[in-house]
Structures are given as C-alpha cells and as structure tokens.
Image: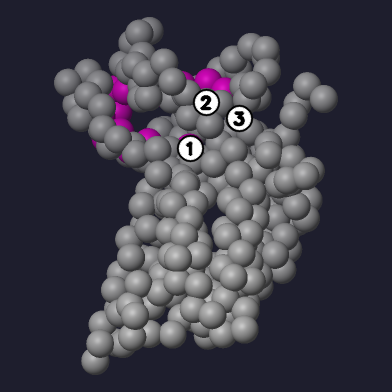
C-alpha cells in the first residue's frame, strides 16, 4: 500500500509539472478576452504551425459591423509590417500567415474595430509563431511517453532515496534508461523531423530543450556512478531528482530552434 501511494504521488507531481510546462510554454496558444466597440471577445491565437500550409488565424466576431486586420513580419528582422485584411466567414474574421521554412518565426498582431481605428487584441506586444515540420505520430507519441515516464521514475526515485526503508538503485537504472531513450534517441529524431537538425544544444547551439535534457542526464549519471558497488548514494539521487524536476518545469521549447533570417 505504501509503495502504491508513493507511485501515485510521483504520478501526481509529474502530471502537475507537465500541465504547468504546457500552459507556460511558448508554443501554447495565446488566449484572452478584450472589449471592442462595447462587445467582449475571446481569442485564441496560434503560436505553432506546420510548414506544409499557411497558418489560419480566426477570431469569432458575431457583430458583422466589425472588421479585422492582420499585421505580420519576420521575427527579429527590420522588415516592415505587412497588412492583410481579414475576411468574414459567417461569425468569424479570418486571415492567413504565410508559411515559413522550418524553425522560421513570424511576429503578428490582430486588430478589430468598426471604423478606421482598430484595437490590437494583444496590445503593443505581438504574438510570435514558429513553423515546424510534421513529426510522424508514432515517433512523437513514443518520445512524449518516454520523457513522461522518465520524469515520473525520477520523482519516484527521489522519494525512494528519501525513504530509508527503500532501495532506490533499480529505480535509478530505469530513470537513466528512460531519459536516454526519450531525450537522446527519440528526441533528436523529433528534432530532425521538426526543425531539420539532430541536436542544437551544447556544444552546437543554445537550444534550451536539448541543454536541459543534457543537464538532467548529467545529474543522473553522477548519481548512477556514486551508487556503484551497491552504495545507496541517497544524497546524490535526491539532488538528481530535484534537478530534473526543476529543469522540466522550464517551459518546453523556450529558446528553441530558430531560423536566423539575416544569416
């Protein structure tokens, strides 16, 4: 019963951290509400799209007197803003962002109003969207499951290290194996499909997703070596477990692959 409760606790912590990471990640749609011409609107603006097509941006606006405008430019360039009128499709105002190469980004803003003066849904701050290649579903699902399990086993191993009645050694091996499969086999395959490169972390770049995976693995390798010859190495395991939890709270894709238009 005690073992089951510890596994349920590890699962709860993992689910909570995964939910937090998703909500705070830079690819999660920008959602909000705004009042325009006396009417309140909810909006959901995309921040990730595949390179196979233009990205549709749609805002529900039942008041047919309202019009919309989409402004965009390539991210981190001196390009002027390109303006596109949004077309009405029933109760929706719809515009399209031109597709970009892998890891290409656009900054864009959506304006609504019933006259020449229109209000930006996100104020002065534009939304940034990144384009990616299509990743085969089996590869992506396997990557997500293995990383999720690695996080859960890492948490459970930390709980075992804190419990003098438990032997965390086998759990360390499972954690290292799952993290290696998810982060260093499946992760690069996903990266290659999505952005054209196998690895963009240290020493080749500054991709935070790759780098945080590398740091997490380094922590667990230290814990694994410290526990050789059957030593429990509880302190090192706790450090590795907490390090991985902190690292994986960092939003996914933050400082991720980005096309340099000026190069």
Marks 2 and 3 sit apart, C-alpha to C-alpha, by: 6 Å
User: Mark number for residue 57?
Assistant: 1
* Tag 2 near tag 3, CB within 8 Å: yes
Q: What stretch is highlighted in magenta?
A: 56-72
- For this rendering, which residue is in front, 53 or 184? 184
Whether residue 52 is visible here, answered yes or no, is no
* Tag 1 near tag 2, CB within 8 Å: yes
User: Mark number for residue 145?
Assistant: none
Query: Which secondary structure, mark 2?
Result: strand
Q: In this view, does 199 lie above or below 124?
A: below
User: Is residue 57 inside the magenta stretch?
Assistant: yes
Residue drawn where x is 29% and y is 87% of the image: 4
Q: How did the renderer colour the structure? A: one colour
Write down the residue under mark 2: 108
Query: Which secondary structure, mark 3?
Result: strand
Query: Which secondary structure, mark 1?
Result: strand
Residue drawn where x is 48% and y is 29% of the image: 127
Classify 10 Å Cα crowding around label 1: few (below 14), some (14-19), many (20 and above). some
Mark 1 or mark 3: whose residue is earlier in sequence: 1
Write down the residue under mark 3: 106
Classify 10 Å Cα crowding around label 3: few (below 14), some (14-19), many (20 and above). many
Residue 258, given in percent of the width and then of the height, sits at 68, 37
- For this rendering, which residue is in front, 194 or 180? 180
Residue drawn where x is 26% and y is 82% of the image: 5
Question: As drawn, is 163 to the left or to the right of 234?
Answer: left
């Amino acid at each position: 019963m005690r073992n089951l409760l510890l596994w349920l606790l590890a699962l709860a912590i993992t689910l909570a951290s995964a939910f937090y990471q998703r909500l705070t990640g830079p690819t999660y749609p920008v959602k909000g509400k705004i009042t325009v011409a006396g009417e309140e609107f909810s909006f959901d603006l995309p921040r990730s799209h595949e390179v196979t097509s233009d990205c549709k941006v749609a805002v529900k606006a039942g008041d047919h007197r309202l019009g919309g405008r989409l402004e965009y430019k390539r991210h981190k360039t001196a390009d002027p803003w390109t303006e596109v009128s949004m077309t009405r499709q029933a109760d929706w105002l719809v515009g399209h962002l031109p597709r970009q190469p892998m890891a290409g980004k656009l900054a864009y803003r959506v304006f609504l109003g019933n006259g020449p003066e229109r209000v930006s849904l996100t104020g002065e701050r534009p939304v940034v969207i990144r384009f990616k290649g299509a990743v085969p579903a089996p590869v992506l699902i396997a990557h997500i499951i293995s990383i999720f399990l690695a996080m859960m086993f890492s948490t459970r191993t930390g709980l075992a290290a804190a419990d003098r009645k438990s032997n965390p050694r086998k759990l360390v091996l499972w954690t290292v194996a799952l993290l290696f499969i998810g982060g260093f086999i499946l992760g690069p395959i996903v990266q290659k499909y999505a952005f054209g490169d196998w690895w963009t972390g240290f020493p080749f770049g500054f991709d935070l997703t790759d780098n945080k995976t590398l740091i997490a693995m380094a922590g667990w390798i230290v814990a694994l070596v410290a526990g050789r010859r059957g030593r429990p190495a509880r302190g090192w395991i706790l450090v590795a477990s907490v390090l991985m939890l902190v690292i994986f709270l960092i939003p996914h894709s933050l400082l991720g692959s980005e096309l340099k238009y000026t190069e």
